[in-house]
Image: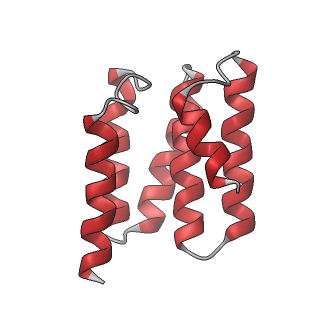
Amino acid sequence: MELKHYIEMLFLVVLLSFGTVQQALSNDYSEEIKIADRKVILAQYEEAKEIYQNIISSADFSVVEAYAYYKLGSLYKKQNEPLKAKEEYEKGLLSLKKCGKTNHQIGKYLARALL
């Protein structure tokens, strides 16, 4: 189980270091997302879900919203709830479509998650 957490953390660090997420997130939400991501790593899933859902409900910037949907979907997938995960991924793609940013990098992650 320890190895799995290290791999997840490494994946998150790689995403952040390459700027895939950094460019998409406004300063208002980046700290909240980091906190939620840490909660996932610590297996505090309900707390992480609540943070992601709060970001979704308050985000004005739809790329941030799409990223939060991606993270929430990934959390449901981790909890072996594939239908809920799919629903969140689809919501993320829809939020990108609404603002005309369907080619954004986060959209590619969402689309890949639906495969």
Task: Classify residue 29 by image quadrant.
Answer: top left
Residue 75 percent across, percent down from the top left: 52, 62
Quadrant of the rendering where the N terminus is positioned: bottom left
Count every numbered label the image shows and give the total: 0
Residue at 52% across, 70% down: 78
Judge from the rendering whether residue 45 lies leftward or rightward of residue 72; answer left or right.
Answer: left
User: What coloring was used for the rendering?
Assistant: secondary structure
Q: Residue furthest bottom?
A: 1
Judge from the rendering whether residue 90 lies leftward or rightward of residue 2; answer left or right.
Answer: right
Quadrant of the rendering where the C terminus is positioned: bottom right
Residue at 32% across, 22% down: 27
Residue 55 percent across, percent down from the top left: 50, 37
User: Relative to 49, is 83 above or below?
Assistant: below
Foreground pick, 92 / 14: 14
User: Relative to 114, is 29 above or below?
Assistant: above
Residue at 67% across, 48% down: 89
Foreground pick, 19 / 70: 19
Residue 53 percent across, percent down from the top left: 55, 46
Foreground pick, 69 / 55: 69
Residue 79 percent across, percent down from the top left: 55, 74
Residue at 54% across, 58% down: 74
User: Relative to 89, is 98 above or below?
Assistant: above
Task: Classify residue 5 by image quadrant.
Answer: bottom left
Task: Classify residue 92 by image quadrant.
Answer: top right
Foreground pick, 90 / 55: 90
User: Relative to 34, is 31 above or below?
Assistant: above
